[in-house]
Amino acid sequence: MNDFNTIELERDAQGIATLWLNRPDKNNAFNAAMIAELLQAIDQVQSDDSLRFLVLRGRGRHFSAGADLAWMQASAELDYNANLSDARELAQLMASLSQLRLPTLAVVHGAAYGGALGLVSCCDMAIGAEEAQFCLSEVRIGLIPAVVSPFVVQAIGARATRRYALTAERFDGRTARELGLLAECYPAESLDQALQGWVDNMLLNSPAAMRATKLLMLEVKQGEVSTPLRRYTEAAIARIRVSPEGQEGLKAFLEKRKPVWQA
């Protein structure tokens, strides 16, 4: 574990990294320090070949209440260029999480407002409590969900994003599942148990194949077929077939045994 002030990064023997938002006294609200530390943690996870996937969670009562009030007050006193620098840091965080080569799973309880909804949208998958509350609340205070908007559109679609960005309506975990923001939702008291089921399922998969699949999905994007994309996919499957884990997986299947990564 590394020494951070606003987050915690845990790694276990199975190759699971858990990144905790850890300002529970501030409902895990973002500030410049948290954004910087999240970027550092994601860089560490990116470079650690022993890891299989990343779980993103929040300590305390909420996943994250969005932007920290003191940070917003300080931002209001900055000039355009200083605000642009702040925005670029947040945008880099969203892009880094979205493009992380490991699979990512957000686990949401309590509130996920503003930029926190962006973090959830940047993850490959998300589960949450039925009672969780989501909101793009920026217009209520005269702002816009600017840097998170592309990722929210990817997660729930353009039409739904327009609605929730313009109305600042709150919606719960069930609605988030209907929109596609959450893959599944559960009663709050069952969330940890449900997470364990997701973890157990992911541990059945080849770590190298999951990383390759993540890169594949980033390249495929919305699935518009082009000649360069066809060539990329052809090379991708050829590479994985001749890789050590690809060979092991095929042999294990044919020999009716478990592959080594399930040991």
Image (cartoon, grey):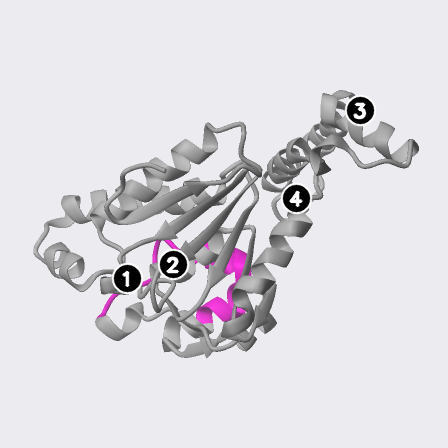
Q: Closer to the N terminus: mark 4 or mark 2?
A: 2
Could you tell me how far apart the alpha carbons at marks 4 and 2 are, in whole angstroms?
22 Å
Q: Disc 4, disc 2: CB below 8 Å?
A: no
User: Does 15 appear above or below 236?
Assistant: below
Instruction: Say left or right for 139 vs 193.
Output: left
| Quadrant of the image containing the C terminus | top right
Q: Which range is magenta?
A: 142-162
Q: Residues within 10 Å of mark 2 (few under 14, many from 20)?
A: many
Q: Residue at x 42, y 40 (%)?
A: 96
Instruction: Say left or right for 145 vs 32.
Output: right
Residue 211 on image: x %, y %: 61, 35
Name the mark nearer the viewer: 3 or 4.
4
Mark yes or no: residue 96 visible: yes
Could you tell me how far apart the alpha carbons at marks 1 and 2 are, in whole angstroms?
8 Å
Q: Which residue is mark 2?
A: 58
Q: Residue at x 31, y 66 (%)?
A: 65
Majority secondary structure in the magenta region: helix
Q: Residues within 10 Å of mark 3 (few under 14, many from 20)?
A: few
Q: Name the secondary structure under disc 4.
A: loop
Residue 225 on image: x %, y %: 71, 41
Q: Name the secondary structure under disc 2.
A: strand
Q: Which residue is mark 4?
A: 203
Q: Name the secondary structure under disc 1.
A: helix
Could you tell me how far apart the alpha carbons at marks 4 and 1 are, in whole angstroms?
30 Å
On residue 247, the disc is: 3
User: Does 105 appear above or below 230?
Assistant: below
On residue 24, the disc is: 1
